[in-house]
Structures are given as structure tokens and as C-alpha cells.
Amino acid sequence: MAPLPPKRIIPISQPALGEEEWQALREPVLSGWVTQGPKVAEFERQFSKHHRVKHAIAVSSCTTGLHLALLAMGVGQGDEVIVPAFTWIATANVVLHCGATPVFVDIDRLTYNLSLAELVQKVTARTKVVVPVHLFGRCSDIAAIRALLPADVKILEDAACAVGASLRGIPAGSQGDAAAFSFHPRKVITTGEGGMVTTNNDELAEIMNQLRNHGATVSEEQRHIGPKPYILPDFNLPGYNYRMTDLQGAIGVVQLSKLEALIKERSKWANWYKQRLSCIEWLRCPEESIDGNDSWQAYVVYVYPDKSPMTRNDIMEILLGKGIATRPGTHAVHMTNFYRRKFNIRPEQFPNAMDCDGQTIAIPLHNNMSAQDYEYVVEQLKSI
């Protein structure tokens, strides 16, 4: 009997890595300089140029980047930081790590980003920072948010999903007081783990630069190549080890050179999905920004519960049985056990976030999919 053909599997996401990234690792491996060094510095320079910001500081993850930025902004005990109720949990966790209180705001159900009407109601005298999330690669309107806030309230862009995205021609990460990006494998470009903090503020940049390296006043690279090997750095701050390795930096340089092409391809297939899926009356496709360039980190559809032939979860299970991986859009953070218990929050306090928690599906969209893969996903959705 002939063996059965392998079952078709389409992953929810897959990094676009290849021979160039493999070859880029040779230099740091053969040189022996594998911790933060010249490749990280090159990645930072190119990233800041691409996103039109003065400073780009590579870190070990977007989470550590958000943490550094909040600390540099002076966030601490007694402060409030406004975050969307629908986001990855790290957006809220880093606020607690600073000793401050996360204040949740509901989202706009069409954009999945922070609701400006809800934001206005949550700003108090204790509000120190607002953290808009550019969810799934669609930019929040930072200019509109800024116009609603007192002058002393800072903006930290959670741009984890938004590398290469822009709004009105202005890149993500360049309008807030600071921003943090992710290079996790589910993002458009990746370094495995890793992140980048950006800012146009010299003082914030200097503080974050020191904090990521144990609070040292001199970088490891400067210390090792300096003419006085007996001098150790002084420490002005109680910092952390949030550095990126040169192995990651080398991969990041190559990945960044491909960014525009990767986004262009994702945008093409996002538009194709919308054309092909618009006939499914129980499904809502995401809207592309009218005056922006979305990075399409994820393609998240919404299932109308009153029109759907079955529950969102049943649909996801059927697709999995057909070899199509899916995920919920993301968390309604206020509904997770920790936050629900700690702050005594009821799910219905943020109805849009609660709704999107239960009704969104991220379907496969990445740069390793073939035209046949996309066609297969559409066919299986239409067959439900």
C-alpha cells in the first residue's frame, strides 16, 4: 500500500528567514563577538533611519523595551498608566513592574485600537503615561491622542506589531515620547526574541541606554576596545541586563533590508483576502487604514455571533482539522485571572474588548504562504 500523503498544515505565522540570515551569522560567530556589539549598533542605526527617529536602542524584547521606557519616564508608585483592554498582556504587566497602576480603556471594535472617546474619560491627575497599541500593524492616531491629553502626560507607543507601519506618512514609533517594537517570530521581521526602543528625546535615550546595560555609563563595546583596560564603568542607575546579542543584530540587519518587500506582499494578500471573503455574511474582514500603511502583522477577522452558523471556537476547531492554524486576535487583558481578581473587574466593564476576545480569529498571513495556501484557507472558510 502506498503511504498516505502528508496532511496539509498552514501555520498561523512563520518567519521569513533564509540563506542571507544564515550567512550573516558568520561574522559575529567567527569574530567571537556575540554579545551586544557592532552588529547591534548597525541594526540600531538602520532602524532609526528607516523609522525616522533620532534614537533606536536594541533590547532583549518589546516587553523589556516598554519597561525601560516607562522607567525612563519616571513611572512609579502612585502613578496611573492608561492601556487598552484588548492587547497582549505585556502591555499591562510592565506597568505593574514599575509599581504603577494600569488603567484599562475600551477599544474601537473596527480598528481594535484604543477608543479615543473612552480615553478622555479615564485621564486623571495621576495619569503619567498613555500606551496606545498599534494592534495587528494598524497605527493608532497618535496626533489625535496627543491633542486630548494634558501637556505633562507622556505617550509610549506599543508598536510591537507595527514595524514598518505608518499613518499619514509618519512612521510608527516616531510621534510618541518613546515607542517599543517586537522582533518575535510572529512579527513581520524577527531576530528570534528581541526588540527596539525608539525616541527623539535625548534624555530618555540616555537613561534607557544605561538601564538596558545594568545602569553602566559606558557600553561593553566601548569598554573592551578602550585604551585603559583597568577602568570599569561607573553606575548611576540600578539597571537591568536587557541587551540584544550581536547574533540577533546580524539577523536584524538582513531582515530590516527586506522589510518593505515583506510588507508589500502581506498587503497584497490582505487585500486579496478581503475581496474573496467579503461574501461570507457572518465574517467581517479588517479595514485597511485610509490614510496609512498597515504592516499586516496579523490578519484578524471578526465573527458575527448572531449570523454565524456556529461559535467562533467551533470554527477554529474545524479549520484546525483541515490543517489551518488560527488563533484568537489577542487577549481582553481585564478578563485574565490575575487582572480580574487583582482589580475586581467585571468582563462587561469593557464590552468591546470582551466581544473581540470571544469573536476574533487571526487566520494565516505570512511571507511563506503560496497562492494555493491562501486559496485553500478561503475555500475552507466558505465551506463552513
Image (cartoon, rainbow, N blue to C red):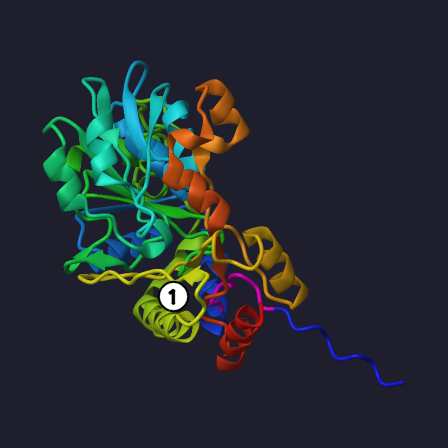
Q: Secondary structure at mark 1?
A: helix
Residue 155 on the magenta span: no
Instruction: Point out the stretch of residues depicted in magenta.
Output: 10-17
Q: Position of residue 258 (x, y in %)?
A: 35, 69
Q: Residue at x 73, y 75 (%)?
A: 6
The answer to which of 24 and 54 lies nearer the viewer is 54
Q: Residue furthest front?
A: 306
Figure quadrant of residue 206: top left
Q: Quick check: can you spot residue 212? A: no
Residue type at the position of mark 1: Val
The answer to whether residue 102 is left or right of residue 170 is right
Q: What is the residue that sits farthest to the bottom in this orientation?
A: 2
Quadrant location of the C terminus in the rendered image? bottom right
> Which image quarter is the N terminus in?
bottom right
Out of 231 and 189, give the one closest to the viewer: 189
Q: Which quadrant of the structure image shows residue 45?
A: bottom left
How packed mark 1 is, by other alpha carbons closer than 10 Å (few <14, some 14-19, many 20 or more), is many
Question: Measured along the vertical axis of the image, is residue 148 above or below residue 338?
Answer: below
Residue 205: where, in percent of width, then height?
Answer: 22, 37
Query: Residue at point 18% right, 50% down?
Result: 53
Image position, residue 250 (x, y; %): 41, 59
Q: Is residue 71 left or right of residue 193?
A: left
